[in-house]
């Protein structure tokens, strides 16, 4: 009985098409040229609403072909520190600033926390990434 009602609804046109199936291409961000994994997206690489705000300056996680629809799963914030990178450890307290070198035990983007081996003392410390190759350690 339920099957018969469903068939009648579909035949009479009462069934609705999900919004995702009706999505207009003008609402999607698409690539203008093929982009390789690891590339940083620049102006003109993508078009669509919010393309500049959401995608320009981001790093591609996977390669995409020209005309492909972009999603947030395609990109990430570019890494500032990678595993085993030599980094500068920065310690600040008031007007005092101390710097030393370390080796990163993880990877991350600006604002991420990462563990680092202080190459001078051989101690493991945790800090926040503040720039390319810079990790701020707080007491």
Image: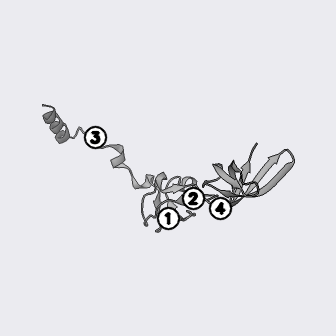
Quarter of the image for the C terminus: give it: top right
- Gap in angstroms between the C-alphas marked 2 and 1: 15 Å
Residue at 12% of width from left, 31% of height from top? 1
The tag on residue 16 is 3
Q: Residues within 10 Å of mark 2 (few under 14, many from 20)?
A: some
Q: Are marks 4 and 2 in contact (CB under 8 Å)?
A: no
Residue that badge 4 annotates:
85
What residue does disc 2 label?
Answer: 56
First of labels 2, 3 by sequence position? 3
**Residue 129 position in % (x across, y down):** 68, 52
User: Which of marks 4 and 1 precedes in the sequence?
Assistant: 1
Marks 2/1 in contact by CB < 8 Å: the verdict is: no
Q: Position of residue 130 (x, y in %)?
A: 70, 52
Q: Residues within 10 Å of mark 1 (few under 14, many from 20)?
A: few
Image quadrant in which you'd find residue 89 = bottom right
Which is more N-terminal, label 2 or label 4? 2
Between marks 2 and 3, how big is the CA–CA gap?
36 Å
Task: Give the residue drawn at x 73%, y 48%.
Answer: 137
Please report the residue visible at 44 percent of the width from the left and 54 percent of the height from the top.
28
Is 118 positioned to the left or the right of 105 in the image? right
Mark 4 neighbour class, 10 Å CA radius: few under 14, some 14 to 19, many 20 or more: some
For mark 1, what is the residue? 37
Q: For numbered disc 1, what is the local secondary structure?
A: loop
User: Residue 13, how many percent across, how many down?
Assistant: 21, 41
Q: In the visual, does 65 lie left or right of 122?
A: left
């Amino acid at each position: 009985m339920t099957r018969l009602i469903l068939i009648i609804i579909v035949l009479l046109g009462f069934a609705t098409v999900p919004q995702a199936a009706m999505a207009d291409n003008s609402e999607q961000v698409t690539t203008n040229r093929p982009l390789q994994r690891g590339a940083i997206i620049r102006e003109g690489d993508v078009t669509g609403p919010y393309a500049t705000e959401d995608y320009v300056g981001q790093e591609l996680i996977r390669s995409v072909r020209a005309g492909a629809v972009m999603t947030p799963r395609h990109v990430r914030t570019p890494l500032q520190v990678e595993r085993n990178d030599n980094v500068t450890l920065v310690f600040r307290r008031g007007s005092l600033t101390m710097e030393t070198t370390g080796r990163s035990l993880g990877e991350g983007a600006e604002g991420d926390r990462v563990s680092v081996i202080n190459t001078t003392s051989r101690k493991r410390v945790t800090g926040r990434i503040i720039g390319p190759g810079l990790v701020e350690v707080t007491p």
